[in-house]
């Protein structure tokens, strides 16, 4: 069944050809309820969950990255929204851990100079650790902030 030819019953989630449902006087053959078109239940996000581009006017897929921006029901959307908030919290914890690691590397670098125990290997590792951990921590912090804006 092609997407344009198909639909489903909102009550029992059974798939149908649109023609078959019309022939059944729009009564679902499975649950015997009147057909409630699923299009009336669709929920669109305001932002793309992947690239966070604004989804205005609402479309099924993001115009930039083609990520899904439509959910079949409000409940499906709420479940996804909770997952996005959880992802933002994980990114925040990761960012804080990386920034803490960068701070430890900076502390190690400063203590090496204060106590005049500078070795090229220790100094280089501290400098690289500070640079990479701090940069990655800041990027994770910004991504966490953007993800929290998802609606």
Image: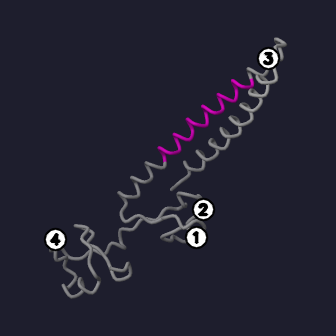
SS of the residue at dot 4?
loop
**Tag 2–tag 4 contact (CB < 8 Å):** no
Query: What's the residue at 33%, 72% (across, down)?
Result: 38
- Distance CA(mark 3)–CA(mark 1): 52 Å
- Distance CA(mark 1)–CA(mark 4): 37 Å
**Tag 1–tag 4 contact (CB < 8 Å):** no
Residue lying at the far front in this picture: please name it: 121
In the rendered image, residue 98 lying in the magenta stretch gets the answer yes
- Above or below — where is 73 with respect to 121? below
**Tag 1–tag 2 contact (CB < 8 Å):** yes
SS of the residue at dot 2?
loop
Q: Which residues are magenta?
A: 85-106
- Relative to 90, is 111 on the left or the right? right
Q: Which mark is residue 31?
A: 4
Camera-near label (3 vs 2) is 3
**Tag 3–tag 1 contact (CB < 8 Å):** no
């Amino acid at each position: 069944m092609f997407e344009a030819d198909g639909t489903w019953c909102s009550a029992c989630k059974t798939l149908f050809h649109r023609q078959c449902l019309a022939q059944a006087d729009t009564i679902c053959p499975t649950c015997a309820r009147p057909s409630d078109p699923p299009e009336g239940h669709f929920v669109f996000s305001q932002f793309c969950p992947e690239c966070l581009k604004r989804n205005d006017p609402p479309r099924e897929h993001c115009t930039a990255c083609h990520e899904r921006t439509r959910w079949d029901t409000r409940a499906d959307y709420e479940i996804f929204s909770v997952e996005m908030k959880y992802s933002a919290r994980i990114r925040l914890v990761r960012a804080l851990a990386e920034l803490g690691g960068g701070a430890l590397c900076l502390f190690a670098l400063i203590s090496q100079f204060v106590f005049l125990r500078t070795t090229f290997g220790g100094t280089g590792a501290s400098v690289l650790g500070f640079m990479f951990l701090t940069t990655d921590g800041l990027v994770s912090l910004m991504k966490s902030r953007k993800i929290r804006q998802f609606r």
